[in-house]
Amino acid sequence: MPLVSPDIHPAILVVYILVAAMHIVAGLSLRACDQLLFSLRLLINLMIEDFDASKSWSKFLAKSVPMDAHTVLYRLALEPFSKAFICCPECSTCYPDNGLGSYPEFCSSIHASTQQTCGQCLRKSCNICSHPYDIPIYHFLYHNFMEWLGEMLCRPGMEDMIEHHFSPSPDRVMGNIWDTLGLYEICGPNGHPFIRKCTDNEGRFLFSFNMDGFNPFQLKQASRSASMMGLYMVCLNLPPEACFKSENMFLAGIIPGPNKPT
């Protein structure tokens, strides 16, 4: 069952929307959402025992409630596709994660100035249900940029906001980046100006790259000073009042803390 079926029972759909809203809007953790799903499933079971115990489809209704919040996000198509990498805790070198045997036990990256191998361990041991397992110390998830761009353009009204004509300011007075004359002199791979009106309706997009640090503890915990760095891309084709909205920004990566990068 890859996505929500059109004939899904309304009660189950309400459960899906409630759990998704609690996670995305209210910021409830996935573990807490799992507990919420368990509680809702238990509630449905109690209602079946009191009112519809004789109906077999009612018991099937309770079993239709998933036990994992990841399943809810997947079936509602709210969880973006991401590629997982193993990240070295020491030098931040990334290795594709295709299973336990797909990456080395120790980092094999060579330092550019010292020519020494990093050698930092990439795994740690943990016990799950009394069984020892080796898991990565750090994970890095990458959301494919082209997939994100396609999802953004598919949103209602988005193409109408993007598809408008840009030209440099005739009086050289610059109100935004599109008034810059040099922007229209940048050539593309074919040697022609990249920013131009295309007869075949080909999209030409301009992005800015931004870095900004933030405290992951949100200043709520006393004496907890830490900093993480977010890497963002902003589509400048959108109007100024829309391009800096969080739903229209691409999170290209995060530089982990607890200290600022030097």
Image (cartoon, rainbow, N blue to C red):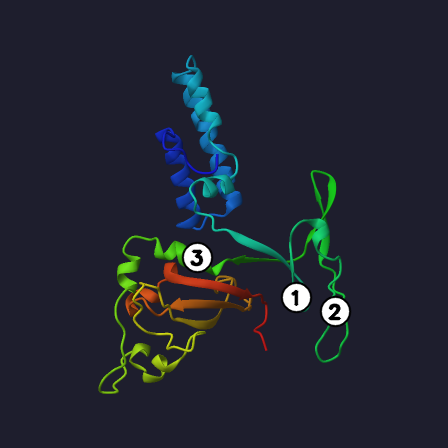
Query: In the rendered image, which quarter is residue 129 located in?
Result: top right
Q: Position of residue 27 (x, y in %)?
A: 44, 51
Instruction: Identify residue type, mark 1.
Output: Thr
The numbered mark at residue 22 is none
Instruction: Identify residue type, mark 3.
Output: Trp
The mark closer to the camera, 3 or 2, is 3
Give the mark, 3 or 2, whose residue is nearer the N terminus: 2
Labelled pair 2, 1 in contact (Cβ < 8 Å): yes
Q: Judging from the image, what secondary structure is the residue with disc 2 in?
A: loop
Q: Residue at x 72, y 55 (%)?
A: 123
Who is closer to the viewer here, 213 or 182?
A: 182
Left or right of residue 230, residue 195 in this image? left
For the residue carrying disc 2, how many other residues have a C-alpha within 10 Å: few (<14), some (14-19), or many (20+)?
A: some
Who is closer to the viewer here, 181 or 20?
A: 181
User: Quadrant where the C terminus lies?
Assistant: bottom right
User: In the rendered image, which residue does mark 3 sit on?
Assistant: 148
Q: Position of residue 155 (x, y in %)?
A: 33, 53
Instruction: Identify residue type, mark 2.
Output: Cys
Q: Residue at x 38, y 40 (%)?
A: 17
Q: CA distance from mark 3 to mark 2?
A: 34 Å
Q: Is residue 225 above or below residue 83?
A: below
User: In the rendered image, which residue does mark 2 sit on?
Assistant: 118
For the residue carrying disc 1, how many other residues have a C-alpha within 10 Å: few (<14), some (14-19), or many (20+)?
A: some
Q: Position of residue 190 (x, y in %)?
A: 43, 74
Left or right of residue 96, residue 110 in this image? right
Labelled pair 3, 1 in contact (Cβ < 8 Å): no
For the residue carrying disc 3, how many other residues have a C-alpha within 10 Å: few (<14), some (14-19), or many (20+)?
A: some
Query: In the rendered image, which quarter is residue 182 located in?
Result: bottom left
Q: Judging from the image, what secondary structure is the residue with disc 3 in?
A: helix
Who is closer to the viewer here, 38 or 160?
A: 160
Q: Position of residue 214 (x, y in %)?
A: 49, 68
User: In the rendered image, which residue does mark 1 sit on?
Assistant: 93
